[in-house]
Image (spheres, rainbow, N blue to C red):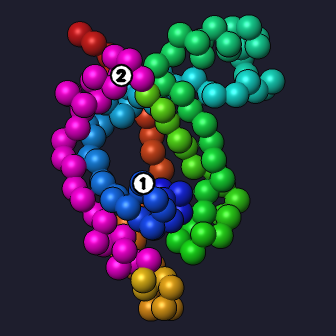
Amino acid sequence: MMYRSGWAAKQGQERILAIDLKRKGFDEIVKNAVLSSFREVSDLSKEEWKEKLENSEVRCQWDPDRDIYGNPIGRRAIQLGIKGETVKKYINDWIVNITDITDKVIEMRNRIQNGTFSESILPQEKRYILFNYTSK
């Protein structure tokens, strides 16, 4: 995210917000995601995929991931786009907290540029496991 925004330096992307979501909401977004481009290895035919994509409120695309210095790291980062009722749920039901982290991002950008950045201040990444919620 920081790479894409130029570390809060790109025009129109000068503010960085951290948005905390309820786990159940994020799981619902991921569960309903449809890949934005067709993959031959999918269980779906191209026609089935196209229909799912047209009817989905969540699109998923996998972008090249980068390290803190902007170097490609050989894995993909998920990018999710939402619309329709999913946006309404996101706004009204799933957001727990919004924090403006712009100052922290700019400080990190400055430290990277002047060679004083320490990766120890980054959060630990953990594997994300999708929970299976059932309604009762």
Determine whether, in the image, residue 111 is placed left or right of residue 35. left
Relative to the observer, which residue lies in front, 82 or 133? 82
Q: Is residue 104 magenta?
A: yes
Outermost residue on the right side: it is: 40
Q: Which residue is mark 1?
A: 12
Which image quarter is the C terminus in? Answer: top left
The 10 Å Cα crowd at callout 1, few under 14, some 14 to 19, many 20 or more, is few
Tell me which label, 2 or 1, sits earlier in the chain: 1
Determine whether, in the image, residue 33 is placed left or right of residue 43. left
Q: Residue at x 63, y 8 (%)?
A: 51
The 10 Å Cα crowd at callout 2, few under 14, some 14 to 19, many 20 or more, is many
Chief SS of the magenta region? helix
Q: Which residue is mark 2?
A: 86
Residue 5, image x, y percentages? 48, 59
Indicate whether 126 appears above or below 132.
Answer: below
Secondary structure category for the residue under label 2: helix
The quadrant where residue 103 appears: bottom left
Q: Residue at x 24, y 59 (%)?
A: 100
Indicate whether 135 appears above or below 104.
Answer: above
Q: Residue at x 41, y 65 (%)?
A: 8
Which mark is drawn over residue 65? Answer: none
- The amino acid at mark 1 is Gly
Relative to the observer, which residue lies in front, 10 or 86? 10
Residues drawn in magenta: 83-109
Residue 12, image x, y percentages? 42, 54
Residue 96 visible (yes or no):
yes
Indicate whether 31 appears above or below 107.
Answer: above
Determine whether, in the image, residue 57 is placed left or right of residue 123. right
Secondary structure category for the residue under label 1: loop
- The amino acid at mark 2 is Thr
Q: Residue at x 48, y 50 (%)?
A: 127
